[in-house]
Image (tube, helix red, strand yellow):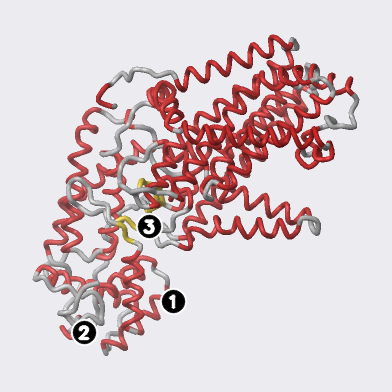
């Protein structure tokens, strides 16, 4: 169990990347994980797809309004629109001040230069032009495979395998770099637009505080405390019941308040004690941390 | 609030209460600047931005050491990150950036690729020569070099008269614009692929260049066998000087990346690839512009100009213009930039 927690913690720390500002503070950026990247990309594809449908409707409209004379203009608009969408949607969006496409914004991630400098246009162009071999090329091989059937089947299979190399590249390096990221010197980090909620947990505090003994408050460490905080913020009835039962059992409490009230009271009391300890230089990473050990 | 035994150390709560207004102001300013641009900010806000940013950073340091409120720390980390990229992102207007690109950055990047450009040119010529010789020797090769949908009737079974016909009015006056657009988008896609494949050690890029050359050679051989060589040259050169130049530059950009991956020199492989990738990207940005010009020349210019001499004149003039633009030595306006 101790090992599991340690692995879990190391995974969290493993996603942190140092970016020290000129003021000397490490921003401690968190890399976007594979799921977030794929999710953002799928959202972008969806947006592009919808735009393409709109473009096609426009073409149909032009043709129906002007007859065949409008066909050429309509076709030019469609072809150029498709070209711009395929090549410049990503580039223009990422060159903007938020350095993120609509999909990335929705997920809460953005592109930054690995060196921490400004994200320049050339970097954005490289990272998006390589999408051609990372996405469109495998896609065309796949379609070739499907439509062709027997004829060049083996060739197409070899092609698909070869292009899979590019597609799966991000899963084989610890920084989750696409080939485009590699060439451009960029990576994708979490930059969620978080709102600071009113200090809800504090206000709900029940009036009677002092019913936990010191031993009961010393059961857990920071990791568990912050997990508890997340549970309380998500406010899911079932989870709260489970967690409350576990904690009651663990600390041997006979407290019979409603589960949520009990957890809030326990959270406040534990946090107060731990923060006081922090001021004295005592930092307990998790429940297995018995002091004197090396922090990861 | 009850005075009995505060649940949190008074410090933590006072810390947040004292600074929260500043954080929210910073958040509001950054959000507005992100939504529109820095110009949407008032002077007073611009002055306040760096101060608020540094305040938030110092809050972050304090919070990390003394507070166990995960939400507070992640909020501050997010806020500081967003503000950091604003305060330290040096920006110039898009117009100025575009001006600098065409005046200095693009030709500079092309010049720095001169070795790869020569190699790409050589590969194309080797392809063209072998295509020409093979097809002249045995017309059976033609079909394997030129895909039938691209040839659209221009093959050895066609009569000389119909071949001559394709040179002078192949599309008719209608549909010129569409044809130009189609050529432009198609060629751009091919050249982007040519560039991107450079990452695979440049091998696919070289293959694409040779392939492109053999196609050219094969078509030339077909027309030369009917005594239409010079006319075909005119048909090709009017746009080909620009188009082939662009494709060769895209290939050169791909080769540069491949070379940097195989032979990184003193740098690490990653750093070398990154540096090559960025200078190659500048070239690629311009290649798209060149292909747009080529598409216009091919789709519209070639259909309207049917005089061979004029076609040669336009094609060679374009080539001369590109060469002067890229390679003519020029004095840099700012000597400190080198």
Q: Residue at x 61, y 28 (%)?
A: B244
Describe the element under mark 3 as helix, strand or loop: loop
Q: Earlier in the sequence, mark 1 or mark 2?
A: 2
Count of labels in the image: 3
Q: Earlier in the sequence, mark 2 or mark 3?
A: 3
Write down the residue under mark 1.
Answer: A238
> Given the image, what chain letter belongs to the residue carrying mark 1?
A
> Given the image, what chain letter belongs to the residue carrying mark 3?
A
Q: Are the residues under badges 1 and 2 in a single subunit? A: yes
Write down the residue under mark 3.
Answer: A31
Q: Which x, y percent locates residue A224?
A: 29, 75
Write down the residue under mark 2.
Answer: A216
Instruction: Say few, some or many: other residues with alpha carbon within 10 Å of mark 1 (under 14 / 14 to 19 / 20 or more).
Output: few
Describe the element under mark 1 as helix, strand or loop: helix
Q: Residue at x 91, y 25 (%)?
A: B159
The mark closer to the camera, 1 or 2, is: 2
Pointers 1 and 2 in contact (CB under 8 A)?
no
Above/below status of B94 relative to A273:
above
Q: Residue at x 78, y 54 (%)?
A: A148
Q: Which x, y percent locates residue B91?
A: 32, 31
The mark closer to the camera, 2 or 3, is: 3
| Left or right placement of residue B228 versus residue B22 in this view | right
């Amino acid at each position: 169990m101790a090992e599991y927690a340690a692995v879990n913690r190391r995974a969290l720390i493993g996603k942190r990347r140092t970016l020290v500002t000129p003021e000397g503070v490490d921003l401690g950026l968190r890399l976007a994980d594979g799921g977030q990247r794929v999710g953002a990309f799928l959202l972008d594809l969806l947006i592009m797809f919808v735009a393409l449908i709109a473009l096609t409707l426009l073409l149909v409209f032009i043709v129906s309004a002007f007859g065949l004379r409008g066909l050429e203009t309509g076709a030019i608009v469609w072809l150029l629109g498709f070209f711009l969408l395929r090549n410049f949607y990503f580039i223009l969006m990422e060159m903007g001040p938020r350095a993120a496409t609509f999909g990335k914004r929705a997920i809460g991630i953005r592109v930054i230069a690995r060196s921490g400098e400004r994200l320049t246009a050339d970097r954005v162009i490289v990272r998006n032009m390589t999408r051609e071999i990372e996405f469109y090329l495998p896609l065309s091989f796949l379609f070739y495979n499907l439509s062709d059937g027997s004829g060049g089947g083996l060739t197409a299979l070899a092609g698909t395998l070869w292009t899979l190399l590019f597609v799966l590249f991000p899963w084989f390096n610890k920084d989750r770099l696409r080939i485009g990221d590699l060439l451009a010197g960029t990576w994708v980090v979490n930059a969620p637009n978080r709102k600071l909620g009113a200090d809800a947990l504090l206000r709900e505090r029940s009036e009677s505080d002092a019913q936990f003994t010191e031993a009961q408050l010393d059961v857990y460490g920071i990791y568990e405390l912050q997990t508890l905080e997340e549970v309380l913020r998500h406010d899911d009835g079932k989870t709260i019941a489970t967690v409350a039962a576990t904690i009651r059992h663990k600390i041997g409490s006979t407290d019979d308040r409603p589960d949520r009230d009990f957890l809030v009271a326990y959270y406040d009391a534990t946090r107060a004690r731990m923060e006081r300890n922090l001021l004295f230089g005592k930092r307990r990473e998790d429940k297995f941390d018995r002091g004197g050990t090396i922090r990861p | 609030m009850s005075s009995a035994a505060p649940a949190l150390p008074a410090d933590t709560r006072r810390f947040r209460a004292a600074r929260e207004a500043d954080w929210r102001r910073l958040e509001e300013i950054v959000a507005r600047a992100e939504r529109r641009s820095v110009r949407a900010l008032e002077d007073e806000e611009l002055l306040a931005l760096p101060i608020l940013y540094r305040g938030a950073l110092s809050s972050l340091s304090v919070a990390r050491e003394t507070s166990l409120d995960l939400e507070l720390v992640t909020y501050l980390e997010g806020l500081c990150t967003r503000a950091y990229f604003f305060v330290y992102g040096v920006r110039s207007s898009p117009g100025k950036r575009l001006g600098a690109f065409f005046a200095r950055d693009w030709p500079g990047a092309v010049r720095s690729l001169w070795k790869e450009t020569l190699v790409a040119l050589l590969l194309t010529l080797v392809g063209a020569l072998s295509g020409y010789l093979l097809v002249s020797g045995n017309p059976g090769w033609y079909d394997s070099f030129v895909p039938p949908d691209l040839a659209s009737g221009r093959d050895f079974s066609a009569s000389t008269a119909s071949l001559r016909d394709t040179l002078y009015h192949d599309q008719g006056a209608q549909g010129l614009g569409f044809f130009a657009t189609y050529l432009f988008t198609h060629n751009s896609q091919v050249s982007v692929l040519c560039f991107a494949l450079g990452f695979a050690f440049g091998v696919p890029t070289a293959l694409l260049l040779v392939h492109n050359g053999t196609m050219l050679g094969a078509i030339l051989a077909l027309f030369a066998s009917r005594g239409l060589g010079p006319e075909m040259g005119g048909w090709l050169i009017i746009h080909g000087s620009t188009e082939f130049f662009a494709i060769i530059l895209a290939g050169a950009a791909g080769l540069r990346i491949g070379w940097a991956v195989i032979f990184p020199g003193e740098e690490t492989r990653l750093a070398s690839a990154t540096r090559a990738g960025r200078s190659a990207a500048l070239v690629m940005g311009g290649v798209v512009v060149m292909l747009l010009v080529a598409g216009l020349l091919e789709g519209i210019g070639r259909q309207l100009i049917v005089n061979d001499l004029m076609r040669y004149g336009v094609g060679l003039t374009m080539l001369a213009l590109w060469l002067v633009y890229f390679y003519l030595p020029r004095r840099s306006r700012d000597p400190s930039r080198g």
